[in-house]
């Protein structure tokens, strides 16, 4: 591919320059941590204005490829292992595939919040909450155990959605996203207790992943908390580091 900017092309010059710089970074012309040429030098090299160069660099900086250092210049950002993020595509597939995923309700009851739930949902410990325990089956095979607690307010649409399947499915579907504003997730390894093991048809003490959550409505009120427990083969964690051509 050419490194020449075609000013007659429909694509803006800054976007062409950004593509050139991205390709040069991917090819190792500018390795991680190395300083790229100054805006003035790139401007002269390609016969474009410094403003156009600045737009291209701002674009790549916004994508996390470049970093400006005041008084020094612009550098290619090294791969940040601490900043890597894992997706939940394996769970998304299970929650949204109604043809292969079934939900079995094990228990729905009213109970006092208790200290832990009260703290998560910003309630007094004596407040009543709805306890839900259910099992997600994949083609008839139990794969995920869920235990959750939500505010006891039937007038809230989030409660109705939660009783159906929620709350992760709410974030995965356009319908649910209109009711849930945000959530906090924590993924930790744990071992199955007696009740979860029986539901999942696994030996007690089997190692699993547990996704604990708290979800908030658009009034920033915590409306639900709980966890999903699933064996490692059900929850796959995958991320990519560095520069990929299709990005």
Image (spheres, helix red, strand yellow):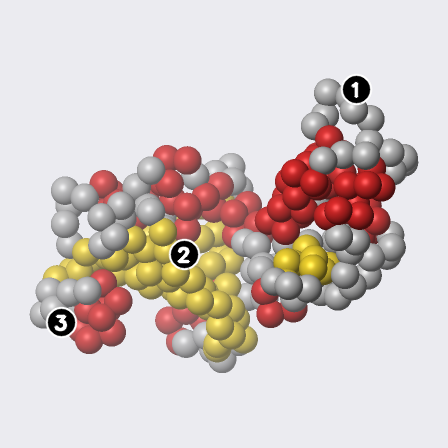
Q: For this rendering, which residue is in front, 32 or 132?
A: 32
Distance from Cα at disc 2 to Cα at disc 3: 27 Å
Residue to which mark 3 is pinned: 125
Q: Which residue is mark 1?
A: 8
Asked if the residues shown at circle 2 and circle 1 are in contact, with their CB atoms under 8 angstroms apart, the answer is no
Q: Which dot, 2 or 1, sits closer to the camera?
A: 1
Q: What residue is rendered at 37% in x and 56% in y?
A: 183
Residue 240 seen: no
From the image, state whether disc 3 or disc 1 is nearer to you. Answer: 1
Element carrying mark 3: loop
Q: Earlier in the sequence, mark 2 or mark 1?
A: 1
| Residue at 49 percent of width and 72 percent of height | 188
Vertical relation: 63 (above or below) 202:
above
Counting from the top left corner in percent of width and height, residue 93 is at: 55, 45
Residue lying farthest to the left in this orientation: 126
Q: CA distance from mark 2 to mark 1?
A: 60 Å
The residue beneath circle 2 is 135
Residue 245 location, quadrant: top right
Distance (Cα) linking label 3 and label 1:
68 Å
- Quadrant in which the C terminus is drawn: top right
Secondary structure beneath dot 2 equals: strand
User: In the displayed structure, does residue 71 sit left or right of residue 21?
Assistant: left
Q: Position of residue 228 (x, y in %)?
A: 42, 62
Q: As rendered, which of 204 and 75 lies closer to the eye? A: 75
Measured as percent of width and height from the top left, residue 36 is found at 78, 56
């Amino acid at each position: 591919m050419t490194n020449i900017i075609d000013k007659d092309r429909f694509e803006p010059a800054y976007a062409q320059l950004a593509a050139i710089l991205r390709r040069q970074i991917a090819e190792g012309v500018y390795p991680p941590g190395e300083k790229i040429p100054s805006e003035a030098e790139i401007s002269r090299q390609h016969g474009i204005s410094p403003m156009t160069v600045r737009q291209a660099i701002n674009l790549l900086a916004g994508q996390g490829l470049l970093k400006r250092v005041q008084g020094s210049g612009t550098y290619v950002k090294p791969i940040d292992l601490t900043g890597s993020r894992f997706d939940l595509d394996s769970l998304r597939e299970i929650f949204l595939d109604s043809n292969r995923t079934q939900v079995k309700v094990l228990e729905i009851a009213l109970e006092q919040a208790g200290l832990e739930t009260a703290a998560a949902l910003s309630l007094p410990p004596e407040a009543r909450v709805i306890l839900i325990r259910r099992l997600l089956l994949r083609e008839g095979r139990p794969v995920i155990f869920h235990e959750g607690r939500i505010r006891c307010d039937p007038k809230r649409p989030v409660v109705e959605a939660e009783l159906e399947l929620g709350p992760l499915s709410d974030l995965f579907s356009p319908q649910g996203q209109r009711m849930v504003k945000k959530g906090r997730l924590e993924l930790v390894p744990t071992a199955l207790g007696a009740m979860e093991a029986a539901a999942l048809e696994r030996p007690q003490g089997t190692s699993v992943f547990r996704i604990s959550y708290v979800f908030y409505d658009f009034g920033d009120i915590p409306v639900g908390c709980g966890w999903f427990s699933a064996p490692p083969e059900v929850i796959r964690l995958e991320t990519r580091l560095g520069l990929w051509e299709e990005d």
